[in-house]
Image: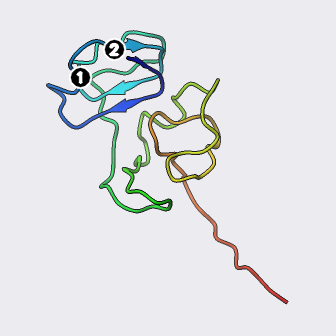
Amino acid sequence: MRVESVLVSGDPLNNCSGSLTSLGHNLDDGHTCGLNASGDLSDTNPLLGEPGYFGGPTRTVPLLPGSPAINHGENAGCPLTDQRGLLRVDGCDIGAFEFYAARVLLPLLLR
């Protein structure tokens, strides 16, 4: 399997079995994925929050402030939106969740 800008976390001693071909910019919180391409991060804590509903139809796992996955994905070919359907901004984050440092919600005024 070829992977790029993928975040693998949860069981550092057994995250991956079988062979992966890294195209770069992946993060593994262990060392079992054999990541060795440009931009790959192994044995790296991704700083993840608890799974929940943060917009979109499915549960997601948020990146916490300071996560090494923020803006570390491959920008060329990066999907325009994350798993929730929110736009990716300021560079592609590794994984399915795009981190937003702050959100300002403006009121909608109808006349």
Query: Residue 54, relative to residue 9: is it above or below?
Result: below
Q: Residues within 10 Å of mark 1 (few under 14, many from 20)?
A: some
**Quarter-wise, where is residue 1 in the image?**
top left
Q: Nearer the viewer, residue 81 or 72?
A: 81
Q: Residue at x 70, y 79 (%)?
A: 107
- Dot 2: element: loop
Q: Residue at x 69, y 73 (%)?
A: 106
Farthest-out residue, left: 13
Q: Residues within 10 Å of mark 2 (few under 14, many from 20)?
A: few
Q: Residue 24's x, y, as percent? A: 47, 16
- Do the numbered discs 2 and 1 sit on residues whose CB atoms are within 8 Å? yes
Amino acid type at circle 1 is: Cys
Using residue 58 as the reference point, say whether residue 98 is left or right of it.
right
**Quarter-wise, where is residue 92 in the image?**
top right
Q: Nearer the viewer, residue 55 or 66?
A: 55
Mark number, residue 55 = none
Residue that badge 1 annotates = 16
Q: Nearer the viewer, residue 27 or 55?
A: 55
- Dot 1: element: loop
Residue that badge 2 annotates = 20
- The mark total stands at 2
Q: Residue 23's x, y, as percent? A: 48, 14
Q: CA distance from mark 2 to mark 1?
A: 8 Å
Farthest-out residue, right: 111
Q: Quadrant of the C terminus?
A: bottom right
Amino acid type at circle 2 is: Leu
Query: Residue 74, relative to residue 89: is it above or below?
Result: above
Q: Residue 4's x, y, as percent? A: 47, 22
Q: Residue at x 40, y 49 (%)?
A: 64
Q: Residue 39's x, y, as percent? A: 47, 17
Q: Residue at x 52, y 28 (%)?
A: 73
Query: Residue 101, relative to residue 23: is it above or below?
Result: below
